[in-house]
Amino acid sequence: MKQTLLFLFFLAFFQFKGMAQCTPTVTQVGASGDYINNFTFGAISNLNSGDAAADYTLFPMTGTYVQGLIYPFTIQSGSPTWGQGFGIWIDYNGNNDFNDLGEFVWASPTGTNTSANILTGNITIPLGASPGIRRMRTCSWFNTVVTQAQSCGLTGFGEYEDYNITIAANTPCAGNPVGGTASVAPANPCPGISVTLNLAGQTLAGGLIYQWLQSPTGLPGTYTPIVGATTIPYVYTPTPGSTNYFRCIVTCTNPGGGFDTSIASGSCIVQPWSPTGNCWCIPTYVNGGGGDNIANVTLGTLTNNTAAAGNVAPYWVDYTAQQVANVLATPNLYVGLASNLSVTHGTDLTQYLGVWIDFNHSGSFEPSEYFSPGTDAGPNGVHVLPITAPPGSLPGLTRMRLRGGDDAQMTNLQPCGPTNSTFGEAEDYLVNIIPASNHDPAVTAITGAAGNCYAANVNMVLSVTNYGSMPITVATNPITCTLAVTGPLGVNYYYGNVNPALTLNPYAANTVPVLIPGVNLYAGGTYYINSTLSIGNAGGVVNGSLQNDSLPSPLVRINYRPTAGPNYNLCQYASIPFGQGLTVSGCATPINDSLEITFTLTPTPDNVGATSGGTSQTVPGAACANQFAGNLANAMSIPALPPGASFYSKWRFDTY
């Protein structure tokens, strides 16, 4: 009998040992930056767990999970640079492996998740899960999507974390349940960061429902329900700058069941939104690169030449403090009005640019807040990118992020962490958003006068729009445009009116042309053309901004038509400068002028083989040196003329 019992003991021991949970392994062991830093699931909250050197840890955190109930989770990498794929397993049947159907409970869809990405999901505990203590395993794998096959090991870089959880039977609730004590974590989050609401000590049974409540003070009578907050735990995003307290009503839905309200959580004080605070996400590059950088930024009043600064680690410079100290200017952006951002890049062969502006003060850079030319500027190249603050932008200071010098085009989802390039630089700035006025007619373009030879009655066209927040009915509030033309003969003004049958819709929804005929550009020379406008004030309408009534830079037109000038005195062997009476072609009708060269020559038998020097005419006083008269015919040097120009010569010799 003793031998039999001893045999059974050893048999049970070896069976248990043989079926022990596998210890997962990675082939590239060490603190490599490929790890899980934050994980929450029900009562488990393992934050800032770090990068374990062994790449495997069995953590002591635990929790109880009822069959049939749904529990949310969050998982996040700790590396801003190295992308990760994630996976989660639960040994529901307690056979000490994760190979059974349904035990691989979740995988991230991509392997590119950095610390900038907080992944969330829900896990439903199956009704058939075996009650008791069960093993849960999480995994991160560098740049690779996790599958069920990696439950015991992976090839490359990664990390595993294990937890022991308790699965409870779905026993129906009865009577009044216990609400337990509410908690919230983190207690001092950055704006836009979610918090996790949880309960401890509450009844665990089937048939329970939950409703979370929020209060700004924690005082009785101030709690109100949070719409949709009906799970334990619950992930919630509080308002930036707010103070919050939380409670939960736990209700038994079975016949005769009641409810209980949990003890309130401690305070959750959300940091206020600030364009200069420390809550902004971090852009990262692996290499940076000496020539993969931003060398100069210009936007409105802001000019920042950083070429001499180079591109040093961490390849991100926050210039907002210098703007607050007025070392750098803070530019204005008008809602609905385009402003040109100019970015000069470094010397590398490939240079891409992406720009984000937090228009809605969410504390994050959203895909809708992204601008990019989508082109390669090349070495020392310049991108000029129109930036327009959209309707609904909140007024005041906000943050702008630039990522430039990249070797590949970034996406609108990459203001934080890595982009598609390991080379590049990021720079942060402040911009000041100025809201749209009610009515703001503006000139957006001036066109006309093509070519380089103009007449005295050129047609010019102005494009007019409305950047205001309300429509402009032109019949009620007429708009008159003034074209100022500064040219060789001074300044002239021309006028045109917006069609009174039209309406200018808000936020530049439509643009209308205004024809201004009879503009005189006949005289040769350079013309600078710009505009102003006025609007009728019926109903108290005023022009909200005079700044955009003119183009930022005038339209420039150059007429090559020659203009008569004073007499030109020419010496033998001297070149004739362009514009001294030569015929210029290229206009519809050639414009002819003449050049007359006068010399007095000492008589000789002929101009060939002359042996005595001629004497130049003292009038008009050219002070030319004596030369042999016979050399005159070969002494003229005609200057190079522009394409399309021509000349002809006519000689006259008078002897005395």
Image (tube, rainbow, N blue to C red):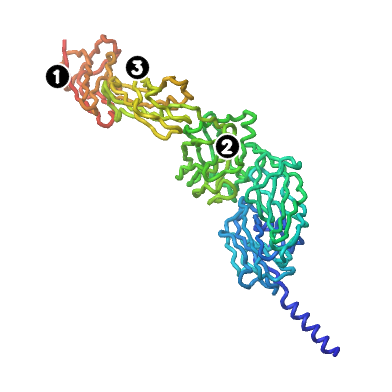
Percent coordinates x, y for residue 463 in the rendering: 37, 29
Look at the picture and state if 248 lies above or below 602.
below
**Separation of marks 1 and 3 at Cα, in angstroms:** 57 Å
Question: Can residue 222 be spotted in the picture?
Answer: yes
Sequence-first disc among 3 and 2: 2
Give the foreground label among 2 and 1: 2
Question: Can residue 39 be spotted in the picture?
Answer: no
Q: Which residue is mark 3?
A: 492
Q: Three-letter amino acid code at disc 1? A: Asp
Q: Helix, strand or loop at disc 1?
A: loop
> Which residue: 42% across, 27% down?
472
> Which residue: 63% across, 43% down?
280
Residue that protrudes farthest toward the right in the picture: 2
Q: Quadrant of residue 104?
A: bottom right
Percent coordinates x, y for residue 376 in the rendering: 46, 45
Q: Which residue is mark 2?
A: 308
**Separation of marks 3 and 2 at Cα, in angstroms:** 46 Å
**Separation of marks 2 and 1 at Cα, in angstroms:** 70 Å
Q: Quadrant of the N terminus?
A: bottom right
**For this view, does 268 lie left or right of residue 486?**
right
Mark sitting on residue 606: 1
Percent coordinates x, y for residue 304 in the rendering: 56, 33
Q: Quadrant of the C terminus?
A: top left
Q: Three-letter amino acid code at disc 2? A: Ala
- Check disc 3: other Cα within 10 Å, few if <14, some if 14-19, many if 20+: few
